[in-house]
Every structure is written in C-alpha cells, then in structure tokens.
Image: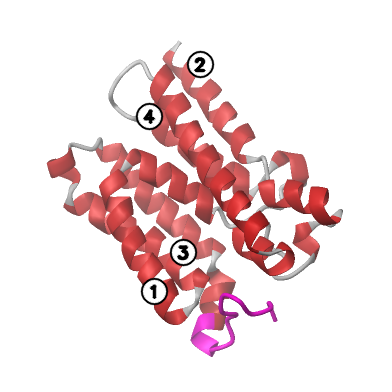
Amino acid sequence: MYVFGLILVILIGYLLGSLSFSYIIAKKIKKVDIRQHGSGNAGATNTLRVLGLGPALCVLALDVLKGIVAVWIGVIFSPDELGWYPALAGFAAILGHNWPVYYGFRGGKGVATTIGVLATLVFFPALFAGIIAIGSIFVTRFVSLGSILFAVLTPVFTFFFLAYYDYPILYGYLTVIVAVLSVWRHRTNIKRLLAGSESKIGQKSS
C-alpha cells in the first residue's frame, strides 16, 4: 500500500508539473508556440521576452504554485514523516515541467517549479539562497545566473541548517539532485555566461 500510494503521488506530481503555463498562455494570447520564439524555452523569462511583463508574472506564479501543490499533495497523503511522498511528488513536478507529457516532452528548465518545491520543503534554506539569487540578478541582470545560484546554494544552506530545522535527511539529498539537474539544464547558459554572450533581462535572446 505504501509503494502504491508513493507511485500515485509521483504520477500526480508529474502530470501537474507537465502543465506548461508559458505554452498555454502564449497560445491563448498570441496563438504561438512559445518554444519557437525568443530563447525557445518554455518558462517565465522567455515569456517576458515574447509576451511582456504581465503574462510572465502570471507564468511565474503558476509554475511556482504547481510545485507547491505537488509537495502538499505528498504531505497530505504521506503515511509517515520520512519525507518520501512530498519529496518525490515535488521532484516529479520538476521533471514534468522539464519533460511534459502533454507537449512532446519539450518543456522548460524548471526554475519556477523548483522554487515552489524547495521553498515548501526547506523554506529557510530556499529563502536564504533566493535572497542571494535575486541580488545577483539585480546586480548582473542575468536571470540564468540567479537561477543557478539558487539551485546550488539551497543544498548548501539545507545541510548547514539540517539539524536546526529538523528537516528529513531525504530533503537534503533531494536538493542536491535538483541542483545537479538544474546545472545540467542550464549548461548552455553557463557556456554563454563564460563566453560573455548570455542575454540579460530586458534584452532580446540572441
């Protein structure tokens, strides 16, 4: 029964994460496939480039929300305090955003959904990492740099505060896996950052 419930919340998390709000909103507003415009990424930053601030904020909020909801579905149905249900439901939502079953497995980079998942599981570590990430975006105007910093610093803060906040050790391991996934998804951004050719917020994607 435990395994069946775990599979169920993972499936729900994945299907929820597969809802690509940037794709849906771009189709509604401009009748275009967001993945064929701007940077080609189905996420809030590319929505900002293609559709403007209002739709981008809407996409950001909805993508964060689906990460939060996925984790809470895991929390509600979890039969124990080990953290498997919420952790894997949240991770499944991130995978769903990156590789959505509804859209030919071509999704975004999962940043906003990752924020929702990690902020729900390990709020204070995610908050501290988020402050640094937002500061880097404000100073450099590189959204990708802030996204990478958030993903990498969250596990650092999580393990630092693991005992103090009494998080399940599984959450710490999950933050590491998510960080590795995020860095891999941003590998082309990292190359452009190192080459000095990465687009800044407010600029058109090259």
Q: In the image, residue 127 lies at what x, y percent?
A: 31, 53
Mark 1 element type: helix
Amino acid bearing label 4: Trp
Within 10 Å of disc 2 (Cα), the crowding (few <14, some 14-19, many 20+) is few
Q: Which residues are magenta?
A: 193-206
Decide which of tag 2 and tag 3 comes sooner along the chain.
2
Instruction: Note whether 4 is above or below 188 in the view shown.
Output: above
Amino acid bearing label 1: Ser
Figure quadrant of residue 129: bottom left
Residue topped by disc 1? 136
State how far apart marks 4 and 1 are (Cα): 33 Å
Residue at the image position 47 percent from the left and 25 percent from the top: 73
Residue at the image position 37 percent from the left and 45 percent from the top: 119
Residue topped by disc 3? 147
Give the residue at the far bottom of this rendering: 196
Residue 4 numbered mark, or none: 2
